[in-house]
Amino acid sequence: METLQKVCLVFTIIGAINWGLIGILDFNLVSMLFGEDSILSNIVYTIVGITGLINIGILFNHIESH
């Protein structure tokens, strides 16, 4: 489970960095790398969204264990 948590954390950080770039510089790194509205961009956004949801579950599991 620890490996899954680390992988999810990496994707969540990538998403956070991308949103930071969008907010500060109006620059979307994912769109620049894979193209706007491309299948690859949609896959990256989907993976980041799913890993964010998994991280919410991990957060609640950690809170309940204390």
Image: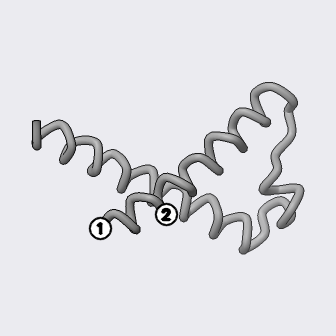
Marks 1 and 2 sit apart, C-alpha to C-alpha, by 10 Å
Label 2: element kind = helix
Amino acid carrying mark 1 in the image: Met
Question: For the point 40% across and 68% down, which residue is it?
Answer: 3
Q: Which mark is residue 40?
A: none
Mark 1 or mark 2: which comes first in sequence? 1
Image coloring type: one colour
Residue of label 1: 1
At mark 1, the secondary structure is: loop
Q: Residue 60's quadrant in the figure?
A: top left
Reading the image, the residue beneath label 2 is 7
Query: Which residue is depicted at the point 21% across and 43% down?
Result: 62
Relative image position of residue 9 (x, y in whole percent): 49, 52
Please give left or right for residue 66 compared with residue 2 in the image: left
Three-letter residue code for mark 2: Val
The structure residue drawn at horizontal position 50% and vertical position 54%, both measured from the top left corner, is 49
Q: Horizontally, is 44 left or right of 25 in the view?
A: left
Q: Split into 4 quadrants, where in the image is the N terminus?
A: bottom left
Give the residue displayed 37% in from the left and 50% down from the top. 55
Q: Position of residue 44 (x, y in %)?
A: 65, 64
The outermost residue toward the top is: 24
Question: Could you tell whether 65 is left or right of 11 in the image?
Answer: left
Instruction: Locate residue 13, reporting x and y percent.
Output: 59, 46
Say above or below: 3 vs 16. below
> Callout 2: few (<14), some (14-19), or many (20+) C-alpha neighbours within 10 Å?
few
The quarter in which the C terminus is drawn is: top left
Q: Nearer the viewer, residue 65 or 51?
A: 65
